[in-house]
Image (cartoon, grey):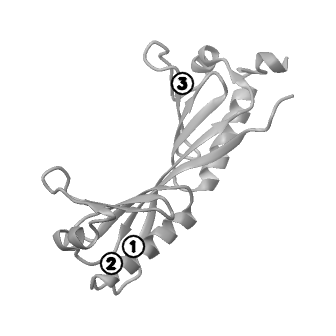
């Protein structure tokens, strides 16, 4: 019996503006147990939190990139924790941080297999070169995401701005592939 399509958020990436300059040299010393800073290799400091398990790239401009979160709630929690840590070090943060979700990456399973050769012929905005990459690359317009679709029915969704985009993308691609008649049950379910 066919399962319903499902998805799982794998990574949420956000940019954050603290509206204040950061002295990375000083912070690298203060955060030596949680951070890495080598300006010859990379202009930012990598600051790691264990709860939630995220990496935060800090730049002297006061801009941050948070990666590794599994939800918007984890992004918010991570930003609160890093702001608290920075304030303990005397950094003046007087405005609320501006948080923007840049990318939500999810894995999904359509619960059926996909005939990629047939799909590539009928799907606009798709690219399939099996000798280069085993998946079909599909650029969806609504929501604006990129899907990597594999013959197993598994896929990766990238470029989403929120979880609702992921859900809509998975539902939309399932419906579209079904209409195009390029889906079939896995052998063990036939």
From the viewer's perspective, tell me whether residue 78 is left or right of residue 178: left
- The residue indicated by pointer 1 is 82
Q: State the residue at coordinates (44%, 64%).
A: 100
Pointer 2 with pointer 1, Cβ within 8 A: yes
Q: State the residue at coordinates (26%, 66%).
A: 32
- List x then y, in percent, for residue 174: 71, 34
Label 1, secondary structure: give it: helix
Pointer 3 with pointer 2, Cβ within 8 A: no
- List x then y, in percent, for residue 105: 52, 46
- Front position in the image: 19 or 84: 84
Q: Residues within 10 Å of mark 1 (few under 14, many from 20)?
A: some
- The residue indicated by pointer 2 is 86
Q: State the residue at coordinates (63%, 31%).
A: 154
Q: Quadrant of the N terminus?
A: top right
Q: State the residue at coordinates (33%, 84%).
A: 88
Label 2, secondary structure: give it: helix
Mark positioned earlier in the residue sequence (3 or 2): 2
- The residue indicated by pointer 3 is 136
Label 3, secondary structure: give it: strand
Q: Is residue 184 above or below residue 138?
A: above
From the viewer's perspective, tell me whether residue 1 is left or right of residue 145: right
The picture quadrant where one finds residue 18 is bottom left
């Amino acid at each position: 019996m066919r399962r319903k399509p499902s998805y799982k958020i794998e990574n949420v990436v956000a940019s954050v503006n603290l509206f204040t300059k950061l002295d990375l040299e000083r912070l690298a010393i203060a955060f030596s147990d949680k951070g890495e800073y080598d300006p010859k290799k990379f202009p930012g400091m990598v600051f790691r939190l264990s709860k939630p398990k995220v990496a935060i790239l800090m730049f002297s401009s006061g801009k941050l990139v948070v990666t590794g979160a599994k939800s918007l709630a984890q992004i918010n929690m991570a930003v609160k924790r890093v702001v608290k840590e920075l304030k303990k070090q005397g950094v003046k943060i007087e405005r609320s941080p501006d948080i923007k979700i840049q990318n939500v990456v999810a894995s999904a399973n359509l619960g059926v297999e996909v005939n990629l050769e047939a799909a590539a012929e009928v799907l606009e905005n798709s690219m399939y070169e099996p000798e280069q990459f085993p998946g079909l690359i599909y650029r969806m317009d609504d929501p604006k995401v990129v899907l990597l679709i594999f013959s197993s029915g598994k896929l990766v969704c990238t470029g989403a701005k929120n979880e609702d985009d992921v859900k809509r993308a998975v539902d939309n691609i399932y419906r579209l592939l079904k209409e195009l008649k390029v889906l079939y049950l896995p052998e063990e379910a036939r």
